[in-house]
Amino acid sequence: MQLIILGCGAAYPRPGGACSGYLVEERGTKLLVDCGTGVLSNLQQVVALKDVTHIVISHLHADHFLDLIPYRYALSRPMHQTLHPRLYLPPGGAEGLLKAVSAFNTSLTFFSDLFQVEEYDPGAALKVGDLTIEFTSVKHYITSYAMAISGSKRMVYSADSGVCDELAEIAQGADIFLCEASRCEAEDDDWGHLSAGDAGVLARRAKVKRLILTHFWPDCDYSQNIEQAKAAFGKAVEVAEELRTYIL
Ligand SMILES: [Zn+2]
Ligand SMILES: [Zn+2]
């Protein structure tokens, strides 16, 4: 089982980078987790679109889904028209996506003509090829789902989240805890996000094996925050790098 970071930017990408997007692979299953700005470009650097089997979206903030629009156009091209990858959206996501494109599209099948669109049930485990996803609702400005993705190993992705028990619970014993750490000011009031120090505390509480921090504002200096994460976790902390592969 492996993870490739496609994008680790917060609500806007660094020059040449991308917002949230992660490719999780287990045998023939290639699962794209979130698809923010710039992700489609990086995705095609590491895999052919014909090999992407499933896509899952954590929540409907633009930095987590916006590249589904160019992805849809890529699927409309002759060589991709038969692919129909499965696209799993949070409850209400199908209508939300159509609203997002309503300024230029009125077709109710704009996405479902080309993706196999389904809304997941956050209360049930979702089997996606060789992987299984469990969801939990976490603390954020809109409903956001952290995910435990299990195959031969177990990876937990925080999605966007503030400090909450639900995140610590789902992260229990994870081989990799991919955790957002976008708050760069410890004193700010950004309750819907975590600081690196918060992520370190959660990782220690959940007894995870590895902590990878992600979801960074390009304009923030996180060096102090990362030191706080190491101190809180009590172990080495990794910082997500775009296009890097992490073997679980
Ligand atoms: Zn985000
Ligand atoms: Zn968000």
Image (cartoon, rainbow, N blue to C red):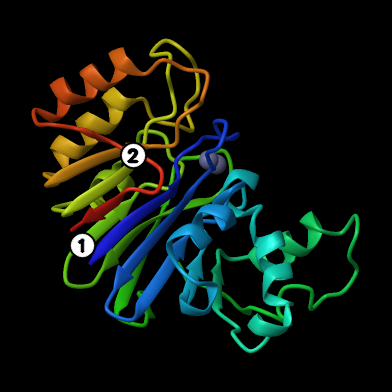
Q: Amino acid at mark 2?
A: Ala
Please state the horizontal and vertical placement of residue 172, each as a whole percent of the image.
17, 51
Residue 124 visible here: no
Relative to residue 131, is residue 21 drawn left or right? Answer: right
Question: Which image quarter: residue 74?
Answer: bottom right
Q: Residue at x 36, y 78 (%)?
A: 29
Question: Which image quarter: residue 203?
Answer: top left
Label number found at residue 154: 1
Q: Residue at x 39, y 49 (%)?
A: 243
SS class of the residue under badge 1?
Answer: strand
| The quarter of the picture showing ligand 2 | top right
Q: Looking at the figure, which quarter contains the N terminus? A: bottom left
SS class of the residue under badge 2?
Answer: loop
Residue wearing tag 2: 240
Label number found at residue 81: none
Q: Which of 164/86 is in front?
A: 86
Q: Residue at x 41, y 34 (%)?
A: 162
Q: Looking at the figure, which quarter contains the C terminus? A: bottom left
Relative to residue 122, is residue 97 drawn left or right? Answer: right
Please state the horizontal and vertical placement of residue 51, each as a whole percent of the image.
46, 78
Q: Amino acid at mark 1?
A: Arg
Please state the horizontal and vertical placement of residue 26, each as a whole percent of the image.
28, 73
Q: Residue at x 44, y 36 (%)?
A: 215
**Which one is earlier in the sequence, the residue at label 1 or at label 2?**
1
